[in-house]
Structures are given as structure tokens and as C-alpha cells.
Image (cartoon, grey):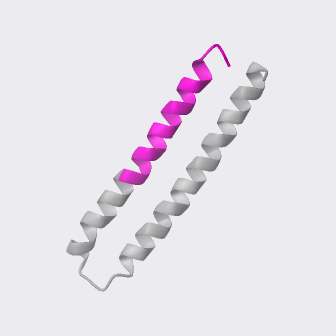
């Protein structure tokens, strides 16, 4: 692949992953909000799911950046 093509591919992968992560996060938050418990019991699930989803997105972005900087691809 050409260097410009690889950059565009990584950019589009990042965009798609970002939209997927936001969709997953919204779905999880909606499902948690539908639980029949108080907000104080929902809060840890909201915080935990938010941290896990966006932590995985951050690691994926960092991995794609590392892959982009490798010279032998």
C-alpha cells in the first residue's frame, strides 16, 4: 500500500470505530437507565461501562497509530 492510502485507511478505521463505540456506549447507558433501581445503584454501572468502552477505543487508536508509524508495512 502507498503511504497515503494507509493513512486514509487508518483514518476511516478510526472514524468507524469511534461511531461504533459511541453507539455501543449509548446502547449500554440506555439499557442501564431502564433498570428499576435508584440512580445511586445505576451510577457504578454507568461509570464502569463508560471507562471500559472508551479505554478499549483509546487502546485501539494507539494501536492504529503505532501501526501507522511502522516503516515495514
Which segment did they paint magenta? 52-73
Identity of the residue drawn at 66% across and 36% down:
11
Q: Position of residue 33 (x, y in %)?
A: 37, 77
Q: Nearer the viewer, residue 45 or 1?
A: 1
Residue 43, image x, y percentages:
26, 67
Relative side of 27 to 55, left or right? right
Residue 18 covered by magenta stretch: no
Residue 72 is situated, as x and y percent measured from the top left of the image, at 65, 14
Front residue of this view, candidates 20 and 38: 20
Residue at x 37%, y 56% (from the top left corner): 50
Q: Observer-nearest residue: 23 or 71?
A: 71
Dividing the image into 4 quarters, which one contains the N terminus? top right
Residue at point 37%, 74% (across, down): 32
Q: Is residue 65 magenta?
A: yes
From the viewer's perspective, tell me whether residue 24 is left or right of residue 39: right
Depicted 6 relative to depicted 20: above or below:
above
Count of all numbered marks drawn on residues in the image = 0
Amino acid at each position: 500500500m502507498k503511504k497515503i492510502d494507509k493513512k486514509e485507511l487508518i483514518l476511516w478505521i478510526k472514524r468507524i470505530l469511534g461511531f461504533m463505540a459511541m453507539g455501543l456506549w449509548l446502547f449500554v447507558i440506555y439499557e442501564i437507565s431502564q433498570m428499576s433501581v435508584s440512580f445511586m445503584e445505576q451510577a457504578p454501572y454507568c461509570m464502569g461501562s463508560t471507562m471500559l468502552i472508551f479505554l478499549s477505543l483509546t487502546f485501539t487508536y494507539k494501536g492504529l497509530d503505532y501501526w501507522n508509524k511502522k516503516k515495514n508495512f
